[in-house]
């Protein structure tokens, strides 16, 4: 598995209600009892997966590039982990 925690890479993530006060799109995994933020290697993979992700009605979502260190810091601050996800919505690595 790839290590995405200490990488010098950019990943793609969905942002909820882009603009002032925007938040990263997060999910809860009941099986593992964890909150996580799905990230993707490319915009195309993110967009392919978008329809598979459970979303709240009425919330606008936008795919944005984010440095992996920035998303890891934000996730840790709010009790989330970052997971790399494929185009089918399956977790590749945490």
Image (cartoon, rainbow, N blue to C red):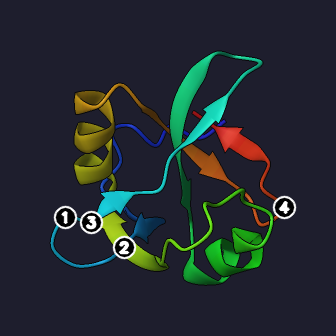
Residue 63 position, x and y percent, is 47, 78
Residue 39 position, x and y percent, is 53, 56
Q: Earlier in the sequence, mark 1 or mark 4?
A: 1
Q: Earlier in the sequence, mark 3 or mark 2?
A: 2
Depth check, mark 2 against mark 4: the one in front is 2
Depth check: give the residue in front, 56 or 47.
Answer: 56
Helix, strand or loop under label 2 = loop
Quadrant hosting residue 86? bottom right
Say the numbered circle drawn on residue 57.
none
Residue 5 position, x and y percent, is 39, 37
Which residue bears the numbered disc 2?
Answer: 17
Residue at position x 77%, y 66% in the image: 87
Helix, strand or loop under label 1 = loop
Q: Estimate the spatial distance between the alpha carbons at disc 1 and disc 4, rounded to whole Å.
A: 29 Å
Which residue bears the numbered disc 4?
Answer: 88
Residue at position x 71%, y 43% in the image: 92
Marks 3/2 in contact by CB < 8 Å: the verdict is: yes
| Left or right side of 3 for 48 | right
Outermost residue to the front: 58
Say the numbered circle drawn on residue 22.
3
Residue at position x 48%, y 78% in the image: 60
Marks 3/1 in contact by CB < 8 Å: the verdict is: yes
Say the numbered circle drawn on residue 21.
1
């Amino acid at each position: 598995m790839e290590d995405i925690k200490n990488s010098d890479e950019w990943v793609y993530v969905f942002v909820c209600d882009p603009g002032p006060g925007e938040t990263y799109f997060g999910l809860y995994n009941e099986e593992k009892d964890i909150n996580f933020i799905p990230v993707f290697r490319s915009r195309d993979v993110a967009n392919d997966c978008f329809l598979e992700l459970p979303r709240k009605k009425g919330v606008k979502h936008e795919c944005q590039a984010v440095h992996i260190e920035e998303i890891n810091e934000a996730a840790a601050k709010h009790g989330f982990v970052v997971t790399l996800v494929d185009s089918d919505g399956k977790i590749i690595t945490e």
